[in-house]
């Protein structure tokens, strides 16, 4: 058994253990809370808004691709976004796991070369992380007014935010000055000893040049994509508002923002689907805010249901895409034989 597989198994076992603990402690109360107060009208609005967020994510990516002079059908990008989401959700790196698939599908379905595709995806993630950092800062500002939260926790969150913004700034600065971040890390960690491909470093440098060009020559597109993220953030606030209402909880704006911030933080934990950590984070938050951890666990259960639906759609898209690729390969083989 290789090290990666062992780490995956260990992370899954830890996640399952945490999930099992909270299921045992809060599961019955949470399920009762949902079944007694379920409002299907609000739940429907929640799913409509959730679907809308995927369209906004795809629109943001399309804006970035157009800056690279790549015209790709909007619904093609939506499909690829869903496929990437599905893979990301079941891998330890929820924020990054599906990105290689997105780049590959973009090449096969829209004839966008991998270097441009990878550059556009990195730009998209940069916009996403910058926006997420701002929402995190907003959540931290709200935490300052909550006496129930210890100063120690507030300090830890402040340090995490400072670290995040520092990384984003360094990445931006090194990109626009042409120094590169990925190629520098590649040399610093001597990855050339592991990755033997001769042109891999050249690919990295080419990708970084495309990113520099985007920052330098496409400021309007960058700003527009960031505004789309802000619109996405507003929709997510309403999404969570109706999610809470769907099981009878009238959450305040502070509670919603903090819920979103916790949701964002746990997605960085290297466990598939943030298993256990999502439940622990949300349950702990509402234990702190209301003394009712079952609200957070109930929220997590519905979020799991939402995720499984879109993961199923994503893997259906991947299955269809794979079938087309296999069919195309067979046709090419037959052509060669004849």
Image: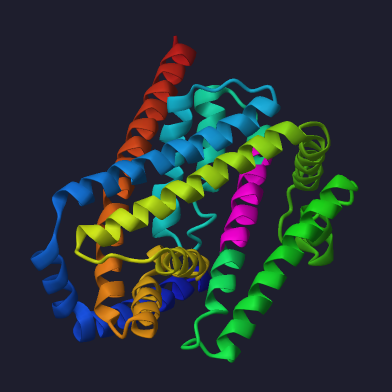
Q: Could you tell whether 237 is left or right of 129 in the image?
A: left
* Residue drawn at the location 64% of the way across and 48% of the way down: 127
Residue 115: tell me if it is visible: no
Q: Which residues are magenta?
A: 119-135
**Which residue is the extreme one toward the top?**
338
Residue 201 position within the rendered picture, expressed as x and y whole percent measured from the top left: 79, 48
**Which residue is the extreme one toward the left?**
36
Q: Could you tell whether 233 is left or right of 160 in the image?
A: left
| Image quadrant where one finds the C terminus | top left
* 60 or 184: nearer the viewer: 60
Seen in the picture, residue 212 relative to 2 is either above or below; the reply is: above
* 293 or 101: nearer the viewer: 293
What colouring method underlies this structural image? rainbow
Question: What is the number of callouts on the image?
Answer: 0
Residue 160, picture quadrant: bottom right
Seen in the picture, residue 199 relative to 76 is either above or below; the reply is: below
* Residue drawn at the location 61% of the way across and 26% of the way down: 112
Say whether residue 47 is magenta: no
Residue 315 position within the rendered picture, expressed as x and y whole percent measured from the top left: 33, 43
| Image quadrant where one finds the N terminus | bottom left
* Residue drawn at the location 27% of the way across and 82% of the way down: 292
* 287 or 280: nearer the viewer: 287
Residue 37, picture quadrant: bottom left
Dominant secondary structure of the residues highlighted in magenta in the image:
helix
* 333 or 52: nearer the viewer: 52
Say whether residue 130 is magenta: yes
Seen in the picture, residue 114 relative to 141 is either above or below; the reply is: above
Residue 265 position within the rendered picture, expressed as x and y whole percent measured from the top left: 51, 69
Residue 63: tell me if it is visible: yes
Residue 296 position within the rendered picture, expressed as x and y whole percent measured from the top left: 31, 73
């Amino acid at each position: 058994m290789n090290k990666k597989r062992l780490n995956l198994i260990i992370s899954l076992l830890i996640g399952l253990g945490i999930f099992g603990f909270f299921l045992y402690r809060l599961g019955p109360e949470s399920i009762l809370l949902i079944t007694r107060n379920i409002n299907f009208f609000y739940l429907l609005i929640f799913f409509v808004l959730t679907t809308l967020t995927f369209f906004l994510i795809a629109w943001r990516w399309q804006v970035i691709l157009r800056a690279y002079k790549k015209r790709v059908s909007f619904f093609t990008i939506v499909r690829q976004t869903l496929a990437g989401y599905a893979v990301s959700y079941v891998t330890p790196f929820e924020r990054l796991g599906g990105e290689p698939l997105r780049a590959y599908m973009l090449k096969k379905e829209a004839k966008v070369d991998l270097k441009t595709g990878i550059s556009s995806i990195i730009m998209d993630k940069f916009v996403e992380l910058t926006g997420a950092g701002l929402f995190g800062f907003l959540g931290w500002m709200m935490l300052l007014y909550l006496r129930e939260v210890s100063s120690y926790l507030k300090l830890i969150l402040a340090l995490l935010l400072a670290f995040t913004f520092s990384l984003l700034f360094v990445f931006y600065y090194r990109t626009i000055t042409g120094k590169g971040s990925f190629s520098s890390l590649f040399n610093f960690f001597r990855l050339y000893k592991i990755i033997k491909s001769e042109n891999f470093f050249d690919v990295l440098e080419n990708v970084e040049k495309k990113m520099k060009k985007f920052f330098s020559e496409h400021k309007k597109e960058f700003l527009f994509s960031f505004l789309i993220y802000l619109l996405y953030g507003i929709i997510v606030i309403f999404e969570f508002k109706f999610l809470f209402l769907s099981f009878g909880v009238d959450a305040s704006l502070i509670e919603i923002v903090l819920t979103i911030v916790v949701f964002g933080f746990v997605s960085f934990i290297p466990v598939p689907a943030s298993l256990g950590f999502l439940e622990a984070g949300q349950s702990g938050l509402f234990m702190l805010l209301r003394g009712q951890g079952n609200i957070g666990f109930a929220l997590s259960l519905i979020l799991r249901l939402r995720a499984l639906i879109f993961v199923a759609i994503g893997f259906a898209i991947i299955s269809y895409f794979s079938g087309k690729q296999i069919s195309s390969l067979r046709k090419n083989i037959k052509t060669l034989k004849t």
